[in-house]
Image: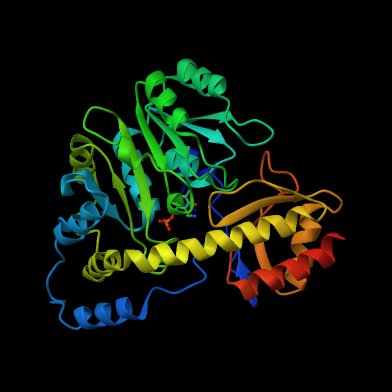
Amino acid sequence: MIPVRDDVRALDGYHSPQVDVAVRLNTNESPMPPPDAWRDAFAAELSRVDWHRYPDRGAVALRGSIADLHGVSPDMVFAANGSNEVLQTILLTYAGPGRTVATFEPTYQMHAQIARVVGSTVVEGERQADFTLDPAEMRRVVAAHDPNVTFLTSPNNPTGLVEPAARIDELLDASNGLVVADEAYAQFANWSALSMVDESRPLVVTRTFSKTWSMAGVRLGYVVGPTWFVAELEKVVLPYHLDAAKQIAGRLAVRYVDEMDRRVRAIVAERERLSQAMSALPIAVTPSGANFILFRPTDVRGREVWQGLLDRGVLVRDCSGWPRLADCLRVTVGTPDENDTFLDALREVVT
Ligand code: PMP
């Protein structure tokens, strides 16, 4: 075997098993497809693409549509293949060997994972037992390590907790580096840091089409940040990284923002119904501002509950073996029928 980089050998890959079951509530996808009108418009435009040509390298039309959606200028928008590639590009640009990236655990694993893959040092701050972030811990980590990039995920994954706006302000005050607010689930929550983005602050906000836009299959995400930040990312990303189909898909998607809002409202209503029903069982439920719920059965081991649900045809995310998440599972909000199937199975398994 050819020796791989020492730091890569030490890494574990990112695992999210794709098991073939009737009810799949493990990857925070939307349970509803995008509107038929979007599908038709997409198909019509695809038939007119000049496939022998490279796509628009600057993704000008796509970025313009996203910029209009948020009332910012297109040079404040950078898009890539899922928000994961956005995060990777940010870290390739602002982190890397000799640089430090801070996270507050437990949080989205890919932040630390990508940071390590690009050669950065990762420092992990600790959330409290209820998964909230103590501002004093935040300031301690930033003062001790002076990170080049600090992540704050709101709503956080896998906890579902929404960070208060004050936490972003405090982080910006304390830190000399870039602050990345990962808002993959922000439309399910009651506020967003987008309005705080401007030229004078090192704050950037990442978003995705995978969840609220019902387009996980498209692989499209973006970041809104100061123009000086976007200009640096453009130097780092590969030429023509966004294919023609993806650019069309995203540009057309934002025309259906009202449909997206309706889907989000339906999922939020189901989330609240699920949370209430789960709270009546011997289960500790973390309050969620996202399209998933983190929960810890109190009388049965988490791993057993996960297996019991799977035996009944329901797949949820098993976080029970992750650091700081002993016995915890995460369920994605599905359709009302899927949620009923989940609740019935859960009642059987935990009582
Ligand atoms: N950020 C967070 C917090 C996520 O949970 C996810 C998806 N699980 C992503 C980013 C990446 O999403 P995508 O690459 O599909 O845009």
- Asked if 3 appears above or below 20 in the picture, the reply is above
- Asked if 332 appears above or below 324 in the picture, the reply is below
Instruction: Answer left or right for 263 relative to 226.
Output: right
Q: At 38% across and 69% down in the image, what residue appears?
A: 259
Coloring basis for residues? rainbow
Give the image location of residue 265, x and y in percent.
48, 61
Give the image location of residue 4, x and y in percent.
46, 46
Give the image location of residue 275, x and y in percent.
67, 55
Instruction: Answer left or right for 215 relative to 113.
Output: left
Q: Quadrant of residue 268?
A: bottom right
Camera-side residue: 191 or 346?
191
Observer able to see residue 23 = no
Camera-side residue: 98 or 82?
82
Camera-side residue: 313 or 145?
313
Q: Quadrant of residue 46?
A: bottom left
Q: At 48% across and 46% down in the image, what residue appears?
A: 110
Instruction: Answer left or right for 274 relative to 154.
Output: right
How many numbered discs sit on the rendered protein? 0
Q: At 63% across and 54% down in the image, what residue appears?
A: 293
